[in-house]
Amino acid sequence: MNAPLSLPTLVNLNVLMSLNPAEALTMKDNVVSALTNHPFFKDIPLGPLEEAGNNLQETLSHTSAGNYAMIPQRDQHLSTVIKELTRVAFRVQLQALDENAQLRTAGLPLLERRTRVPKAHRGPVQQLQGLEVTNLETPGEVLINADSQEAAFGYQFQYTRRDPNLQEDWIDEAPGPHRGCKKIIVRGLDPLNRYSFRGRAIGDDGPGPWSAPVTIPVT
């Protein structure tokens, strides 16, 4: 019997985009376990997801051991795992549109079919204000907070250990935007180094301007 997914979030794209590396690997293992040799979903290719997970596991082991130079590569592998999870999620939904019972037998979550009411268009977002970055007790971890905006549906944050004026050196702290801008934890930074952080709001008309950088020594 196939093991059910312990995280009922496979088809929740907002949750997928906010997974950290360890959570993404757990999700990958659960998806592979639930779908492997399943009679209804056996044609969904899982090889690319497993390969992406192996790559993420390798770079995560290096960064966890203190090789912080591999953080950008780890983040790229995390993004690939999330893309593969998204691909599998869409395939599952497409194959089970008329066979909802098959989703239950695989242990996969169902999407409720609802009539959606179009939302009113929100105005443009402004430059993100009130950005604060605070060191946490765990070395290499910081907490980000900023002022929320009514027109925003998401927030993006970046960091750099180099000159904040060099746009190409900024690194996304997550593969996708956050739904909120409070209590954002960034992990895996190199302790005893100075980092700059910035953020921006994302609205119906696209992302707003980046906030002024905030630079702190990470402990």
Image (cartoon, rainbow, N blue to C red):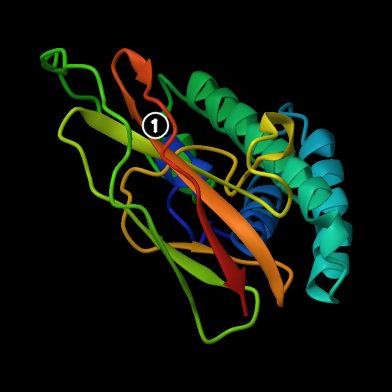
The residue that disc 1 covers is 100
Q: Which of 107 and 48 is in front in this view?
A: 48
Say whether residue 210 is left or right of residue 2.
Answer: left
Say whether residue 146 is left or right of residue 141.
Answer: left
**Whole-percent x and y of residue 216?**
55, 66
Q: Nearer the viewer, residue 104 or 26?
A: 26
- Residue plotted at (18% across, 24% down): 114
Q: Is residue 71 above or below residue 117?
A: below
Q: What element carries label 1?
A: helix
**Whole-percent x and y of residue 68?**
82, 64
Q: Which of 27 and 97 is in front in this view?
A: 27
The C terminus is located in which quarter? Answer: bottom right
**Whole-percent x and y of residue 45?**
77, 30
Number of numbered discs visible in the structure rendering: 1
Identity of the residue furthest to the bottom in this view: 137
Looking at numbered disc 1 in the image, what kind of residue is underneath it? Answer: Asn
Binning the other alpha carbons within 10 Å of mark 1 as few (below 14), some (14 to 19) or many (20 upward) gives some
**Whole-percent x and y of residue 157?**
49, 44
Q: In this view, does 84 lie above or below 213?
A: above
Residue 146 can be seen in this image: yes
- Residue plotted at (48% across, 36% down): 102
Say whether residue 186 is left or right of residue 28.
Answer: left
- Residue plotted at (31% across, 48% down): 180
- Residue plotted at (61% across, 66% down): 187
The N terminus is located in which quarter? Answer: bottom right
Q: Is residue 119 above or below residue 178?
A: above
Residue 38 can be seen in this image: no
Residue 49 occupies which quadrant of the picture? top right
